Image (cartoon, grey):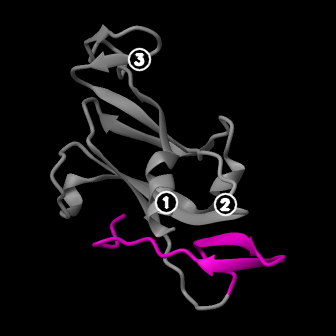
């Protein structure tokens, strides 16, 4: 069950757009078709949205997100200077199952140096107690009753 939930989280982050020139002739790039543009210099904008795939197993999958971190390098690095961060003004509790069929919840926009980014991490608020309501939980029906269980999201560091 935990493995399937982790897969949900990995597939939930959808990048609606990344790239674009900063104006004034700073960015130069090549058109790749459609609305995508590869920019070799300047600034771009990362728009972060979250969505989910359908599930019949669960009634709710709730996650409380406080931010998004992005990194250009594929190597895992923990130095804060290596990461760009979108911090949400207030953490947001999202029922992932309410975001199906193309429904997106926009988390925010972040100005970044144009380029290719290889890591995106959601910063999730940890659960603080052993009884509902939880910051992160899974709800399902069992023998005619609704059950809410805490969702443990493993991470090596609190950085996402």
Q: What residue is at 57 percent from the left and 66 percent from the top?
A: 64
Spot the residue most to the bottom.
130
Look at discs 3 and 2 and give the one toward the viewer. 2
Span shown in magenta = 132-160
Q: What residue is at 58 percent from the left and 72 percent from the top?
A: 136
| N-terminal label among 1 and 2 | 1
The residue nearer to you, when weighing 20 against 58, is 58
What residue does disc 3 label?
36
**6 with respect to 75 (left or right):** right
Which disc is residue 4 wearing?
A: 1
SS under mark 3: loop
Contact check, label 1 and label 2, Cβ < 8 Å: yes
**32 with respect to 97 (left or right):** left
The residue nearer to you, when weighing 148 against 99, is 148
| N-terminal label among 3 and 2 | 3
Q: Is residue 92 magenta?
A: no
| N-terminal label among 3 and 1 | 1
What residue does disc 2 label?
57
Percent of width and height locating residue 59: 73, 63
Look at discs 3 and 1 and give the one toward the viewer. 1
Separation of residues labelled 1 and 2 (CA atoms): 11 Å
Q: Is residue 149 magenta?
A: yes
SS under mark 1: helix
Above or below, 50 against 25 in this view is below
Separation of residues labelled 3 and 2 (CA atoms): 36 Å
Q: Residues within 10 Å of mark 2 (few under 14, many from 20)?
A: few
């Amino acid at each position: 069950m935990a493995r399937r939930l982790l897969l949900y989280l990995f597939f939930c982050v959808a990048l609606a757009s990344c790239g674009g020139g900063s104006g004034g002739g700073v960015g130069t790039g090549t058109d790749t078709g459609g609305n995508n543009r590869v920019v070799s210099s300047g600034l771009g904008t990362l728009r972060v949205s979250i969505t989910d795939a359908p599930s019949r197993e669960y009634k709710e999958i709730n996650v409380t997100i406080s931010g998004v971190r992005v990194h250009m390098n594929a190597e895992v690095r923990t130095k804060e200077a290596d990461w760009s961060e979108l911090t949400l003004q207030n953490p947001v509790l999202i029922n992932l199952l309410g975001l199906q069929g193309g429904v997106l919840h926009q988390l925010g926009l972040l100005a970044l140096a144009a380029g290719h980014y290889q890591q995106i991490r959601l910063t999730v608020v940890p659960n603080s107690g052993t009884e509902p309501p939880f910051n992160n939980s899974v709800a399902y029906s069992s023998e005619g009753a609704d059950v809410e269980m805490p969702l443990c999201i493993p991470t090596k560091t609190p950085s996402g």
